Image (tube, grey):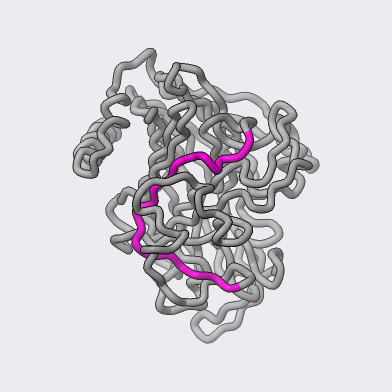
């Protein structure tokens, strides 16, 4: 069944991409295989509490390799070929475990229990008031002090003829970081022979609780150590976005992007209007269908120099564009690279920020007996 599903998914992508006029990516990604997909593992390091952290490397069999840590579910590296066949690591991160165990800018992590911000770290649910950590100015960010980015997840693997999968599991007890309910979480990473990385999120709870999971990878398609991404071209398939206040909490409005610096409905360089939004983009875009199902095309980015491209599909109603606004050259990453401001961009498929406090937004509440489920697919190719 898994093999048949992968083939059906590729066919759907092909038809939809042809409809949108973006067939060059998919045609260049036709499944001419160098080898079968594979998955390997190694000890990446040992946490300060003595727990080992494993790194799994998934290979598509077509030059794309994705390395993921059990610590934080971190996507540590993605090695992707460019137009001339040269491979580069296109995600920001570190070479060793200590900087990941220290506080860092969520490089590649799974973020939750609630990705993005909750205003004042406070919400009321079913008549009960809950107070969370305020770890981002006055607000709660990405699950708090010790969110899912700071869990050492248990891991298992699966192999199929045209894909390999890494399955991570973790639990969050009732009261964890102030949230109600004991939550069980599974995140499944699947890499296939079409150079598509699929992320499936699942969660259940014992009490009603807000939940919003995403992957917080920083991408630089020219290579993680190649400077800023302001010349990358980006298209976001969203007609509206969520304006924010001075603390980056949505105001509650859903505003058309047309004629504004947030209009990425046609592709243009990320940096062409970035000064018009202050320090940079850190905003949620409302995907045109507002749907959680089925998969919808959310964004497409490419680097003109290398030709490397990233296409994002998701079942979520929003995607957060973040342009590494708070990175500084004091942040030393892989290979001694200094990650300057705007050294990477994030496309975080997610529910709306602060949805628990804004009833006009799609609900973020998971209740007992329900299963939280969403899927994101990242396709890597050449433009």
Q: Name the residue: 30% across, 50% down.
A: 295
Q: Farthest bottom residue?
A: 127
Q: Name the residue: 56% across, 40% down.
A: 229
Q: For residue 90, which quarter of the picture?
A: top right
With 11 as the anchor, is 29 left or right in this view? right
Q: Farthest top residue?
A: 34
With 318 as the anchor, is 171 left or right in this view? right
How many numbered discs, if any? 0
Q: Is residue 244 magenta?
A: yes
For the N terminus, give its image quadrant.
top left
Residue 18 visible within the image:
yes
Q: Find residue 324 and report its horizontal and vertical position in percent.
A: 62, 49
Residue situated in front as seen by the camera: 280 or 219:
280
Q: Find residue 327 and report its horizontal and vertical position in percent.
A: 69, 47
Q: Find residue 85 and report its horizontal and vertical position in percent.
A: 45, 17
Q: Name the residue: 51% across, 66% down.
A: 353
For the C terminus, give its image quadrant.
top left
Residue situated in front as seen by the camera: 43 or 106:
106
Q: Find residue 297 and report its horizontal and vertical position in percent.
A: 32, 48
Q: For residue 318, which quarter of the picture?
A: bottom left
With 101 as the anchor, is 366 left or right in this view? left
The vertical placement of 267 against 204, above or below, is above
Residue 198 visible within the image:
no
Which residues, given as a range, are shown in magenta? 227-245
């Amino acid at each position: 069944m898994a093999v048949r599903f992968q083939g059906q998914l590729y066919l759907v992508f092909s038809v939809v991409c042809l409809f949108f006029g973006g067939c060059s990516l998919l045609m260049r990604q036709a499944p001419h295989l160098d080898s079968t997909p594979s998955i390997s593992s190694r000890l990446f390091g040992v946490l300060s509490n003595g727990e080992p952290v494993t790194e799994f490397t998934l290979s598509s069999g077509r030059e794309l390799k994705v390395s993921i840590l059990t610590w934080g579910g971190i996507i540590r590296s993605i090695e992707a070929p460019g137009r001339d066949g040269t491979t580069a690591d296109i995600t920001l991160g570190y070479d060793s475990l200590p900087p990941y165990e220290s506080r860092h800018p969520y490089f590649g992590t799974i973020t939750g229990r609630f990705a993005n911000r909750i205003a004042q770290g406070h919400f009321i649910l079913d008549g009960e008031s809950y107070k969370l950590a305020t770890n981002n100015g006055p607000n709660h960010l990405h699950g708090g002090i010790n969110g899912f980015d700071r869990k050492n997840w248990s891991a298992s693997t699966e192999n199929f003829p045209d894909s390999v999968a890494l399955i991570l599991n973790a639990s969050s007890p009732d009261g964890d970081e102030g949230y109600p309910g004991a939550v069980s979480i599974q995140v499944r990473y699947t890499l296939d022979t079409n150079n598509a990385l699929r992320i499936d999120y699942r969660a259940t709870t014992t009490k009603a609780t807000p939940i919003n999971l995403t992957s917080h990878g920083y991408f630089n398609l020219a290579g993680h150590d190649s400077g800023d991404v302001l010349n990358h071209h980006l298209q976001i398939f969203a007609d509206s976005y969520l304006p924010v206040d001075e603390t980056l909490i949505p105001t509650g409005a859903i505003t058309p992007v047309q004629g504004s610096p947030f209009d990425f409905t046609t592709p243009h360089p990320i940096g062409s209007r970035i000064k018009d939004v202050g320090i940079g983009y850190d905003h949620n875009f409302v995907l045109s269908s507002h749907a959680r199902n089925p998969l919808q095309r959310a964004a497409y980015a490419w680097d003109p120099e290398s030709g490397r491209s990233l296409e994002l599909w998701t079942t979520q109603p929003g995607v957060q564009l973040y342009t590494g606004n708070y990175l500084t050259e004091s942040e030393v990453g892989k290979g001694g690279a200094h990650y300057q401001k705007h050294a990477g961009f994030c496309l975080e498929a997610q529910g709306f920020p602060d949805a628990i406090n804004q009833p006009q937004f799609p609900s973020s509440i998971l209740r007992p007996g329900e299963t939280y489920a969403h899927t994101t697919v990242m396709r890597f190719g050449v433009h």
